[in-house]
Image (spheres, helix red, strand yellow):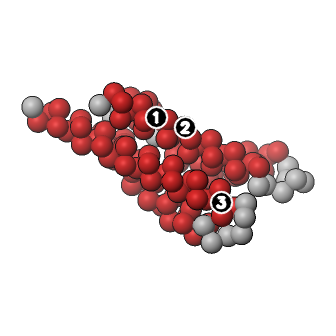
Amino acid sequence: MTLLLNLTRLFYALLLLLGIGGLWWLAPPDAPLLAKIFMTIVVYGPILIFAHGVVSGSPRLLTWLCFLLMFYFCGYVIQLFYPPPMGILAAFRVTVLVALFITAMLVIRAGRADLDR
């Protein structure tokens, strides 16, 4: 279970890095700093709320994170149809998001299997 939890943490960090980094990289060059910070909080704030759950491996918080990830998955799949570089970045985001979803679900399942014993 430790390996799965570490993979979940890795994919969580990668998703935040790709998401926030892509948001700042693709922002218009004349966008004010305050606008970038505000958009970062609005778009990735909900995922940041679950940082404690990813670090601790709480099955309840990971379940809610997986529920939230479905909304991000829908948005990223729509972004796949955008022209490059947005579409290419969206492909990496979808890949990392699916990996995060799968590893989080496996952590939840492994935790429940430990409780059943």
In the rendered image, the quadrant that contains the C terminus is top left
- Neighbor class of circle 3 (other Cα within 10 Å; few <14, some 14-19, many 20+) is some
Of pointers 3 and 1, the one earlier in the residue sequence: 1
Residue at x 40%, y 50% (from the top left corner): 101
Which mark is in front, 2 or 3? 3
Secondary element under disc 3, as helix, strand or loop, is helix
Look at mark 1 in the image and give the residue it sits on.
9
Point out residue 69 in the picture as x, y percentages from the top left corner: 46, 54
Check if mark 2's residue and mark 3's residue have beta carbons within 8 Å.
no
Disc 2 from disc 1: Cα separation: 6 Å
Disc 2 from disc 3: Cα separation: 19 Å
Look at mark 3 in the image and give the residue it sits on.
88
- Neighbor class of circle 1 (other Cα within 10 Å; few <14, some 14-19, many 20+) is many
Residue 13 marker: 2
Looking at the rendered structure, the kind of residue marked 3 is: Ile
Q: Is 74 drawn above or below residue 3 in the view shown?
A: below
Disc 3 from disc 1: Cα separation: 23 Å
Secondary element under disc 1, as helix, strand or loop, is helix
Residue 23 marker: none
- Left or right side of 110 for 99: right
Point out residue 66 in the picture as x, y percentages from the top left corner: 39, 51
* Image quadrant assignment for residue 90: bottom right
Which mark is in front, 3 or 1? 3
Secondary element under disc 2, as helix, strand or loop, is helix
Q: Is 24 drawn above or below residue 87 in the view shown?
A: above
Point out residue 12 in the picture as x, y percentages from the top left corner: 50, 40
Of pointers 2 and 3, the one earlier in the residue sequence: 2
Looking at the rendered structure, the kind of residue marked 2 is: Ala
